[in-house]
Amino acid sequence: MSKRILVTGGAGFLGSHLCDRLVAQGDEVVCLDNLFTSQKLNIEHLLQKPNFHFVLHDVTEPFKFEVDEIYNLACPAAPGHYQYNPIKTMKTSVLGTMHALGLGRRLNARVLQASTSEVYGDPDVHPQVESYRGNVNPIGPRSCYDEGKRAAETLMFDYRRVHKMRIKVVRIFNTYGPRMHPFDGRVVSNFIRQAVAGEPLTIYGDGKQSRSFCYVDDLIDGLVGAMNTSDDFTGPVNIGNPVEFTIRQLAEHVVRLVGGAAKIEVARPLPQDDPKQRCPDISFARSVLKWEPKVPLEVGLKRTIDWFRSVDMSQFKAPTPNY
Ligand code: NAD
Ligand code: UDP
C-alpha cells in the first residue's frame, strides 16, 4: 500500500535520490527544502509527477502535513556549507528535528533522522562501532554540525522515552554520487571537478587521512531499509562502505578514471579537527537490516564522473565562498 512520506532536505543530494526511490515505488511524497545548499534542478524531473509535491520551507519554522513517515534530512552537510553560518546549522539540526518529531508525535508517524559519522568526531576507536561515544570537540569549527547532530540524536531518543515514538537513527558515513553539489568543497566533488577541468587536485595535509566512500544508491537502500524495519528497531545504525582509502589514494583513482594530465598537489594544511581516519563497522546493519553496500568505488566514481561531465556547472550556485 502506498504511504504519504515527508522528506525534509528533499531537494539535496541524498534527499533527491530518496525522493526518486519513493516516488518510483508509488508513495505520495512531500519534499520540503529551503534550497540553501541545493537547487530545483535536482528534482526538476519529479515536479510533473502526480505523487510528488515540492514545498519551499525552512525547518527552523514549524510545518504540518498529513503523512505516515518522515525522513529528516534537512541540514547542510559539507564542511564548507555548514561552517558558512554555523549558528543556523545548529538551529537547523535542533529546531528542525524538534519540529519533525513534534509533527511525527501528533501523527504517530515513524521519524528517521539522518545522523552522521561526525558524531564520532576524530575517532580513537577504529573502525567505528555504534557503541563508541566519540571524540568530538564541542567548541571547534566543526562543532555546529557535530554537536547539532548529537543533540538531534538526543531529541530522537528522548521523544522515544517520553512519548513512545517510533524512531530510526541512521549514522551516515561519507556518501558520493551524481547530484553532489560541484562546489560544495567535499573531497569527491572537488577532485572530480578539478580533474575534469584539468586542474590540480587539492590534497589537504599529507593525504594519509582516510575515509570510506559509499555510493548513493547503496545509501538509499540503507535508509529505506532502516525506515521499514520493525518498531523495535531504533538504531543508531551505521550506514556506509567499510572499504577504507587514504585521500591520496582517492585522488589517484580519480586522476586515472578521468584520464588526462591532472596533477595532485598538497594545497594546504589539514583543517582544524579534521578526522584522521574514518571507517564504519557495519556488523549491526548487516545483521539487523541485512544491508551491505554493493557498488565498488571504481564503479561509483565512473558514474559520478559521467554525471559531472554531463551537467552545466554554471547552473549550480555556490552558496558559500568555500570552493
Ligand atoms: P545537501 O546539502 O545536498 O542536502 C541538504 C538539504 O537540506 C539541501 O537541499 C538544503 O537546501 C536543505 N536544507 C538545509 N538547511 C535547511 C533548512 N533550515 N530548512 C530546510 N531545508 C534545509 O547534503 P546531503 O549530502 O544530501 O545530506 C543530507 C543529510 O544527510 C544531511 O542531514 C546530512 O547531515 C546527512 N549526511 C550526509 C552525508 C553525506 O556524505 N552526504 C554524511 C553524513 C550525513
Ligand atoms: N579534502 C582534501 N581536499 C579537498 C577536500 C577535502 O584533501 O579538496 C580532505 C579533507 O581535509 C578531509 C577529507 O578530504 O580530510 C574528506 O573531506 P570532506 O570535506 O569530503 O568530508 P569530511 O569527511 O571531512 O566531512
Image: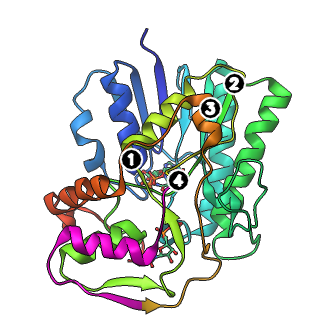
Using residue 278 as the reference point, say whether residue 42 is left or right of it: left
For badge 4, the amino acid type reads Pro
Marks 2 and 4, how far apart at CA: 28 Å
Q: Residues in magenta?
A: 243-266
- Does dot 1 land on a helix, a strand or a loop? helix
For label 1, the residue is 216
The first of marks 3 and 4 along the sequence is 4
- For disc 2, the neighbor class at 10 Å (few under 14, some 14 to 19, many from 20) is many
For label 2, the residue is 166
- For disc 4, the neighbor class at 10 Å (few under 14, some 14 to 19, many from 20) is many
For label 4, the residue is 242
Give coordinates of residue 111: x percent, y percent.
62, 30
Is the residue under label 4 in contact with that under label 1 (CB below 8 Å)?
Answer: no
Image depth: mark 2 or mark 4 in front:
4
Marks 2 and 1, how far apart at CA: 25 Å
Image depth: mark 2 or mark 1 in front:
1
Identify whether 299 is placed above or below 28.
below
For label 3, the residue is 287
